Image: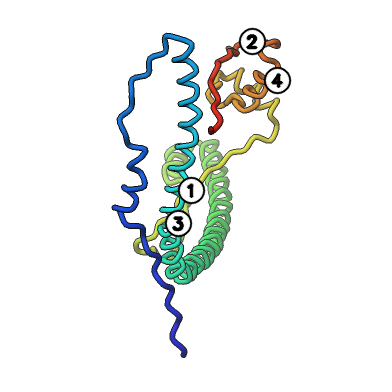
Amino acid sequence: MPAKKQTPMPKLPAVADVEAKLAPYMGELKPIVIQTDEDYTGAGAELRHLKTEQKAVTAMKTEALKPVAELRDTITSWFAPALERLAGREQALKKAIGVYDSFKEAERRRIEAELRDAHAKEVAAALAEADRLAEADQMEAAEAILDEMPMIPTVISAKPKLSGISTRELWHAEVTDFTEFLVWCIDNSRLDLLQANDQALQAHARMTKGGVPIEGVHIWMEKSLAARSA
């Protein structure tokens, strides 16, 4: 079998080189004081230049991270086949065990149903006999029959216990009729099950600009500065 071709390891950037590139952006920052129109325009110009610097540093970061991403992808590719094989085997085993569990449970229910049917007939016959004895004034014999009534049978599955493996019950819920669900939540004081559609509310606020109020919703406007790179 031919030897597998080795993937070369990516080379990480030197720390000194990265620090040298970042040095121009690590200077002392002057206090921000805006008291005149000149200060105001100067702050605006610095803000635009700041966006340019942010883009430059972000680009350097992205470039520096490339070898890391390549290294991660290379190592991941080494382990992926084995992990995928193991995960597939795990799912196949769980499915097979689950099928056998269902079979044994169905068998247990069938046997238990048969025993309970027989129990019901036995109880009915015993009650009839007790009534007959009571009508014949044989109360002690009737009470003896009632005291010895058979217990309701319960069948426990005979399947072996798997060491270190347990079965969990996972319950799920989904809304099939939102109107009925909404009425139920209101009638039962379970508004905690409802969640406002924040994305739709934000879109409504942007589209109406506060011109169409919604009861129970606070709509307001905030101003923010947007700067383009110089």
Q: Which mark is residue 169?
A: 1
Circle 1 crowding by C-alpha within 10 Å: few under 14, some 14–19, many from 20:
few
Judged left or right of residue 19, residue 167 is: right
Q: CA distance from mark 4 to mark 1?
A: 46 Å
**Circle 2 or circle 3, nearest the eye:** 3
Between 37 and 205, the residue placed more toward the observer is: 37
Q: Amino acid at mark 4?
A: Met
Sequence-wise first label, 4 or 3: 3
Residue 141 visible somewhere in the drawing: no
Q: Amino acid at mark 3?
A: Lys
Q: In the orientation shown, which residue stands out farthest toward the front?
A: 38
Residue 21 visible somewhere in the drawing: yes
Examine the rendered structure and indicate whether residue 224 appears above or below residue 61.
above
Mark 2 sits on what residue? 215
| Residue 217, image x, y percentages | 60, 13
Q: CA distance from mark 4 to mark 3?
A: 41 Å
Mark 3 sits on what residue? 66
Sequence-wise first label, 4 or 1: 1
> Helix, strand, or loop for circle 2?
loop
